């Protein structure tokens, strides 16, 4: 049985029903641009929080630094278009690569900390990234931020006049993040992350390489956050240090999962629907 088939079976088809319902909302329910914008942002931050849930919900490593990966995805996409005139889709891919590399580098240091010390370290790092981004204004735009060039309806450049397209892209992103989270949850990695959350010493005594498992979990969790940042950048067409790395974004990604149920498969989905609007 395929992974998709197993997912449908394990959720009783609920995932498919929700996906079809959400994707069809612009056709019969969402009638204003404001509601469409709120719904799109809900799905974008849902995807970022689903990524957060891998390392923090399943693994118990409560991070307040996933805005780093969100911001890296957004800024990489923006900088490659504004400074180097590269295709937006290239920026999306490179944004993920940069986020994963930084996740490994930062995780090599921060994941040696535990509990509140890890949380504080990740929160401090996202503030550092915000300060650095604001300081190097000649490259990043500083506090003024970066604005994407107006390209009109150019699908080949990730630009669409019809904002419903961005809604459907955000729906696809959230769906892929949900499937990836489910795959991790059902995998050996997911079992090891939950064992570390329950009792790291006991997990290590059972042969779990805790540091390596947490590092892999952090790298995986960075991918949906970076993709969410890239889609957010293309949708809003503007980014600055606060909206990329700021404390509000850092806490929002985590709080969404907490509201819906951190460590639960549907937690970030429920939390985003409640909190973001």
Image: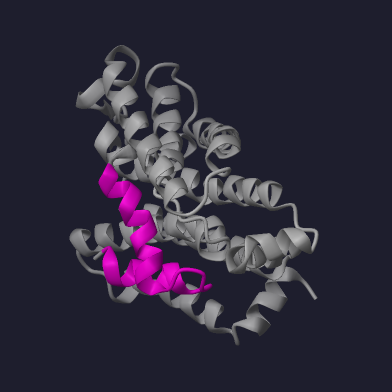
The residue located at (30%, 37%) in the rendering is: 237
Query: Which residue is nearer to you in this view: 47 or 90?
Result: 47
Q: Quadrant of the C terminus?
A: bottom left
Say if 79 sits above or below 180 in the image.
above
In which quarter of the view is residue 244 placed? top left
Q: Which residues are magenta?
A: 247-276
Q: Position of residue 130 (x, y in %)?
A: 31, 31
Q: Residue 217: say if magenta.
A: no
Q: Residue 269: say if magenta.
A: yes
Q: Is residue 95 left or right of residue 256?
A: right
Say if 269 sits above or below 10 in the image.
above
Query: Which residue is nearer to you in this view: 223 or 28?
Result: 223
* Magenta segment, prevailing SS (helix, strand or loop): helix
Query: Which residue is nearer to you in this view: 184 or 80?
Result: 184
In which quarter of the view is residue 70 placed? top left
Q: Position of residue 251 (x, y in %)?
A: 32, 53
Q: Is residue 69 left or right of residue 102?
A: left
Q: Position of residue 89 (x, y in %)?
A: 52, 35
Going by the picture, which residue comes out furthest to the bottom?
12
Say if 241 sits above or below 235 in the image.
above
Query: Which residue is nearer to you in this view: 158 or 234?
Result: 234
Q: Quadrant of the N terminus?
A: bottom right
* Colour theme: one colour
In which quarter of the view is residue 54 placed? bottom right
Say if 36 sits above or below 80 in the image.
below
Numbered marks: total: 0
């Amino acid at each position: 049985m395929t992974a998709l088939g197993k997912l449908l079976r394990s959720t009783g088809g609920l995932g498919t029903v929700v996906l079809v319902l959400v994707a069809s909302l612009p056709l019969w329910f969402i009638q204003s641009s404001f509601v469409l914008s709120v719904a799109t942002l809900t799905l974008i931050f849902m995807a970022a929080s689903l990524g957060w849930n891998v390392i923090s919900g399943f693994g118990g490593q409560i991070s307040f630094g996933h805005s780093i990966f969100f911001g890296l995805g957004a800024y990489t996409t923006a900088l490659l278009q504004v400074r180097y005139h590269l295709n937006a889709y290239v920026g999306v891919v490179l944004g993920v690569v940069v986020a994963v590399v930084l996740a490994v580098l930062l995780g090599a240091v921060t994941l040696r900390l535990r509990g509140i010390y890890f949380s504080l370290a990740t929160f401090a790092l996202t503030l550092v990234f915000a300060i650095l981004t604001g300081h190097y204004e000649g490259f990043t735009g500083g506090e003024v931020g970066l604005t994407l060039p107006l390209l009109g309806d150019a699908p080949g450049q990730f630009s669409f006049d019809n904002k419903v397209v961005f809604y459907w892209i955000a729906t696809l992103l959230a769906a892929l993040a949900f499937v990836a989270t489910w795959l991790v949850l059902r995998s050996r990695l997911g079992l090891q992350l939950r064992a570390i959350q329950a009792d790291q010493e006991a997990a290590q005594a059972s042969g779990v390489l805790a540091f390596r498992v947490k590092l892999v979990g952090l790298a995986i969790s960075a991918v949906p956050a970076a993709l969410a940042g890239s889609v957010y950048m293309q949708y809003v067409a503007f980014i600055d240090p606060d909206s990329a790395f700021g404390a509000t974004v850092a806490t929002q990604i985590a709080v969404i999962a907490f509201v819906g149920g951190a460590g639960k498969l549907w937690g970030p989905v429920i939390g985003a629907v409640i909190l973001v609007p």
